[in-house]
Every structure is written in structure tokens, then in C-alpha cells.
Amino acid sequence: MIRPFNTHRSRPARTALAIVAAATVAGLIGWALYCHTASKAGIQRAMTQVMRTGYYQLEVDEQPLLRFGTDQSRLAAVWTDRLALVPSCEGRLTVSVDDSLNAHRYAGRDIKKVLAQKIDSLKKDIRHLSFKVDELAYYRRVHSVIDEGYETISRFSFQERKRLDSLRHLLDTLQCVKPTDRVAITYHTDYRVALPGKKTTEKWEACTVTDTLRDDHCLILQTEGRQKPDGGTSYPKSVAAHIARLAGHNIRRPITWRHRPDSAGVYIGSVDKLFRPEGHGVHIGNDGTYFEGHWKAGRRNGFGFRLSNTQAMRVGEWRNDLFRGERVLHTSERIYGIDISKYQHEKGRKRYPIHWDKLCITHLGGISRKRTKGGVNYHVSFCYIKCTEGTTVHNKYYAADHRAARASGLHVGAYHFFSIRTGGAAQAAFFLRHARIRKGDLPPVLDVEPSPRQIKGMGGAAVLWREVRAWLKVVKRKTGVRPILYISQMFVNRYLDLAPDVKRDYEVWIARYGEYKPDVRMRFWQLSPDGRVRGIHGEVDVNVFNGYEAEFNTFTRSTQ
């Protein structure tokens, strides 16, 4: 006989079962609350940083050709569990990032038109950078390590040459794309997570994107090692996404006062207590200008150099943002020379010979201050001798001096003093009739020294340049050598830009008697009219070649 179920005897069992079920539910609820509740300490243990690198890729016929437009940013990231109630991180992270603007930047655009615009932009950049590199190369050619700032400028020159090579390579690559090629621009991102390293250093591990939380604008990443660091906390996706969004897309970098933007560009360097440029620093202008040097109270003060896209490089001393010039250090390593006329032989009724075998510069003149290293006892390497003036004046000592100077081993040249009273072609013919231009001699020189009043009296600068061109062209045609133009710094500032063809095609010899070197590309610098030379009576014009021995040898070989 089957006995009926005793419901009264099973009540304790049911009670125990209910208690167990309730405890289980409470435990699950507690665990869920724990998993979905983030404490400050827990958040700190769950947080890390991800380095995001985005770039565009040009593809031709579905094959990658080049990358461009690379940018980097640090993102806040949170270690994340795959399952809500079970520890299941396995190296997963959540980051809040929205790349939709970058990803669709070129969507719907004519890519070949974009390439054409990029090629035009590159050509412009290359043209500007080529000008700067040429200016830097010229500086290095005529300077050496004894010149202030040489090493700094040389390092910058190397960087700019590398940048120019990179731009040229990029242009060549883009110009290889044919009109019939199928082209596309795609956007790509790479991610790396910062993991604890030894001591205070970080190590970076690559990550891949495994999922997208579109509603939260978040990505789920996973490390290559698929491991969470020891001691780290992880949260379910929903909690991790919330923390990542609150943390912001980018890690806020500490403020660095060494980077100081302004309306003209950005300054990078030391600052004073008022955050003004102070000490060594660099200013990169929005217009492509570059200045590096010393600053004081927010202004350029001291040594520095400036480059622009179109203007000649300026190297030397600056004062309250104004360029003063390059202050030369005179040493025996430089190449010195003299220029002479009848006045080195005649003083009133007295006549003086030149002792060519004893020539040595003993004083650089007293009109301006000179920086020297060691005693002034400089070898004379070259000599220019006045030959003619206008169409009537001939230096009677020229032939003998030319012969003696060559015999003593000097590099010798002849110069003509330009007259405003006669035409340039006639003066050139007169000069050629008397000058003894031999193979290996220095190029002939035209000495142009009219005052502004004299230039105005002869009809203005246009008339002057017409006659100067005539002299230069006749002498070049007859001798096969391109003459040099002797002018003052004042003449350079007022008149040289009015004859761009002369400025481009002819080298210049500049007279400037101040403490600073002339601010122009030149072959010679006449630094004083009152120097002293052993072997010559009285005062002598002292000149210095713009360059050192290697450049001087190159120059003299070109005249042979």
C-alpha cells in the first residue's frame, strides 16, 4: 500500500531550500552590485593608457603606396571583463574614441584631384625648403667650427636636408600614379597599451580591436599577450565604458611652458618667471620663418640665426629683435688680402717702394672694434691693384706692382674705378687696354662708389645700372671671366635690389667698416681702409676672403 506524501514533515526541508535559494540570490545580487559598482581605488587600479596612432593610406589598385597624415594621442583605457559576473578580462580594454571624422575625411571626394592639390603643395614646400637648404649650405661653405654657432647651424642644416630628401621622395612617389590607376585613401589606426615595466619605465604592447560599443562610442581592445597586469582591476563592459567616457578621450598632458604659441607662430625653449622667452629658444613662424638663438625678456638678444622662405639667412648678433650683423672672430686661419693704388707709393712729393717679400698684416685698422684671437700677424694671400679710372686715369705703378705681386706668389687681380662721366663700354675698353689679366689671376673688379647725389645727377639708378651692365658684359666677353662688383653696404641696401640680374649673376666685394660683417652673399669683405701692412708705407685697405682655405682654393682654381 502506497503511503500518501506527508506535507507537514517536508516543511523544514522547504524552508531550508528557500533559505539557500535566497542566500544564493542575495549573493548573486551582491556580486553583481560589486561588479557594477566602481570605487575610487578600484578605478585607479583599472585605469591605464593607450597610445593611438592614426594615419591615412594611399592605395593604388588596392595596393598600399604610402602613409601620410599621421597623428598620435594618448587615450584613457579601462581593463574590461568579457562576461558581466565572471572574471574574464584576458587582456581586454575599453577606450572611448570617435574616429568618424577622420575615417570619412576623404569620403565622396575626387581622390585624383586631392592628389593633384597635394603635389602642388609639395612643390611649393620643396621650393621654399630648397631655398633654406641652399642658404644653410652657403653658410657652411664659408664658415668653420671657429665661428660662433657653426655646430648648431650645421645640425639644423643636416635636419633640413633630410626633410627635403623626404619631401622629394614623397613627390616622386605621388607623381608615379598614372591617370588610369584606381586610387583610394583609407584611414587606419594602431593601438598600444602601457604596461608596468621595471622601476618607473613603461613598456608598450600592441592591441587589436575586437568589438565596438557603438552606443557608447567605445572600442574593445585586446592585448597580444591576452593578460591583465598583476594587481589590476577589471570591470564589465558597461561599467568600463562609463568610466572611459568620464575619463575623457585624451589623457591631459601636463602643461609645458617650453611650448608657447603666439599670433605669429610657436616658441619652444626657456622662459622667465613672466613666461616670456628667456635664454636659448626657437621660434617657428606661421609664415615659414625659423629663428634659433638667445632671448631676453621676450626679445631676440644675443647670437642667433634666422631663415625664411624667400629672404637671405641672417646669422649673428641681435639686439631687441633687430639684427645687427655677424661679428667676426679674426684669426690666422682666415684668408686676408689687400688692395692698393698709387697712394701706397706716393705721399706728397715722397715716393715709397713696396717690399713684396715682407708683406704681413700687423693691424686691422681702428675705425671699428675687431674681435681677434692671438696677435695680428696675418699672411697676405691676395692683392688687388688699381689699374684705371674712367677713360683717362691710368695707375702708372700698376704694371710693376702686378709683375712683382705675381712673382712673390700672391693671387693678383686688377680693378677699375667707375666714373659717372663716361659710358660703361668706353670705360671697359680703356681698362682692357691697360690691364694685364693673366691665366690664374683673380677676376677683374669694377669699383662703383658714386654718392646718391651723383647717381641722381647722372639720371638716376636706372642709368647707373645700364652703364655698369655695359662694363661688366664687355669685360666678361673679352676676358672670358665674370667680373666682381665692388660696392659698399650702403649701396647694397639702396640700389642692389634694383638690378636683380646683376645681383644674381655677379659676385660682390663689399666695403663695410663697422664691427659687423656685411649682410649679403659676397666674395670679399673690405673691413678697414686704415690697416697696417709690414712692407708698405702708410695705411692700407685690408680685406678678408669670405671663406676659409678650402673655399679659397676652390675659388682660385675656378679662375684658371
Image (cartoon, rainbow, N blue to C red):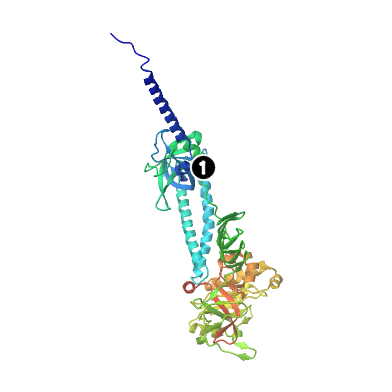
Residue located 65% across and 67% down the image? 494
Mark 1 Cα shell of 10 Å, populated few (<14), some (14-19), many (≥20): some
Residue located 48% across and 51% down the image? 171
| Relative vertical location of residue 464 with respect to residue 97 in this rendering, above or below | below
- In the orientation shown, which residue stands out farthest toward the top? 1
Which quarter shows the N terminus? top left
Residue 98 can be seen, yes or no: no
Residue 490 place in picture, x, y as percent: 64, 71
Please tell me in which quadrant of the rendered image residue 492 appears: bottom right
Numbered disc 1: secondary structure: helix
Provide the residue designation for mark 1. Answer: 247
Residue closer to the observer: 507 or 130: 130
- Amino acid on which the number 1 mark rests in the picture: Ala
- In the orientation shown, which residue stands out farthest toward the bottom? 350
Residue closer to the observer: 445 or 371: 371
Residue 417 can be seen, yes or no: yes
Task: Give the total of numbered labels.
Answer: 1
- In the orientation shown, which residue stands out farthest toward the left? 1
Residue 9 place in picture, x, y as percent: 36, 16
Residue 372 place in picture, x, y as percent: 54, 77
Residue 222 place in picture, x, y as percent: 40, 40
Residue closer to the observer: 279 or 152: 279
